[in-house]
Amino acid sequence: MSLTEGSTMSAIESTKRQRRPHGRTGGLLGTVPIAVAGSIAVTLNLLSPAHAAADAERERAPEKSDATGPQKTVGVDTIRGSFAQGAETASPADTDTAAAPATYRVQTGDTVSAIAARFGLSTAAVLALNGLSWKSLIFPGQVLALGGAPTPVSAPAPAPAPAPSATSYTVVRGDTISGIAARFGLRTAVVLSANGLSSSSIIYPGQRIAIPGVAAASVDTPRAVVAPAPVVTAPAPAPAPTVQPGQVVPLTDEMRANAALIVRIGEREGVPAQGIVVALAAAAQESGLRNVRYGDRDSLGLFQQRPSTGWGTPDEVLDPTRATLAFYGGPNNPNKGRTRGLLDIPNWSAMSVTQAAQAVQISAFPDAYAKWETSARAWLAQLG
């Protein structure tokens, strides 16, 4: 054969080889390059990325022929089988579906279509929920939203109801803790505890006292009331009389009744006239001879005795008879061992009226009793 003829035959054979199909490539995918076919399979979720990579590797490395047959490639057959397998997996009729959870973690070998079929969902719906397209890849460990009911979470225990807030009460002249407590149906100890006070504490007009467990609407209404009582507005107390030294102050009916009580108890207890004058002067200076329910700090009654310093309970110091006995002291002192009365002071009879009164009362104004001495002697003369 000549050189020309050999060249011509080689060209013809080359052309034939180029037109000859490569391996088993019949069908739709037989005309598609293997890399593109693998991508299509992954995109349609017929193969996971791991599957696609393995098949592509096998396609690049043809199997060796054995002793009985020629070599063959397996990539296209694997992809065709995956298409069929994916179509079969995606058929809800052949799959037992479970209730869809809110999320699902991708496992090795999972496909979107298989996951959708497992939970009775459409592939398109799962793609849409996760912002995926038909070209998207999923990977083991990836979390997909499936739109099911979220895992129930135990509701937190309800918070305990807050304790009733304390209502505040503004102290007015004449108030005592025991009186305030009684007004709201509470024990005195409860009100003291709510305000960090003790039985010796002092309260002042204008001070705010916490009233525990009482609604705001009940501030002006006692808690323990069997039947509504008529509202009686107490008249404002008359101002204490003013006096100049040497002046005799006339007695009102209230003053006369209290002065007569002081004189009568003094005479019954064997108190000398000088002692009765001291008691009258002290009561006139402290209360204007009136049994008042208010005073400086917790002072109350005829002699403005203070519960916080041991003179008795508010009710006791508001009892004119008991208060007078406590002022005189002596054998019948109701506060024996706690307070000192006039008869308990050594050499009291040698003192002036103001000195003797001050020794009992321990006032911040020790000389104030002197101006009542003239009136006190006149009252004793009238009532004795």
Image (cartoon, rainbow, N blue to C red):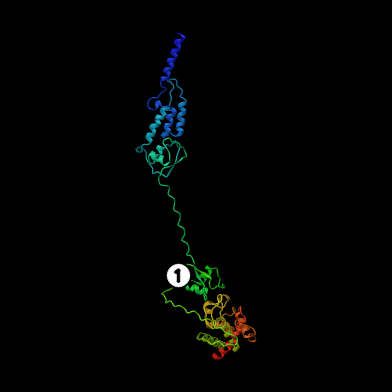
Q: Residue furthest left?
A: 93
Residue 34, quarter of the rendered image: top left
**Residue 108 placed where, x, y %?**
45, 36
Residue 22 is left or right of residue 350, and the answer is left
Give the answer, above or below, for where 256 lies relative to 21.
Answer: below
> Could you say which is closer to the camera, residue 22 or residue 86?
22
Give the answer, above or below, for where 246 lies relative to 213.
Answer: below
**Residue 112 placed where, x, y %?**
41, 37
**Element assignment for label 1:** helix
Dividing the image into 4 quarters, which one contains the N terminus?
top left
* Residue hosting label 1: 218
**Residue 13 placed where, x, y %?**
43, 15
- Taking the spot 46% from the left edge, 34% from the top edge, the residue there is 49
**Residue 174 placed where, x, y %?**
52, 76
- Taking the spot 46% from the left edge, 33% from the top edge, the residue there is 50
Asked whether the viewer can see residue 354, the reply is yes
Dividing the image into 4 quarters, which one contains the C terminus?
bottom right
> Could you say which is closer to the camera, residue 320 or residue 251?
251
Badge 1 local density, few (<14 within 10 Å), some, or many (20+)?
A: few
Residue type, numbered disc 1: Ser
Residue 88 is left or right of residue 326, and the answer is left
Residue 286, quarter of the rendered image: bottom right
Give the answer, above or below, for where 154 lies relative to 322.
Answer: above
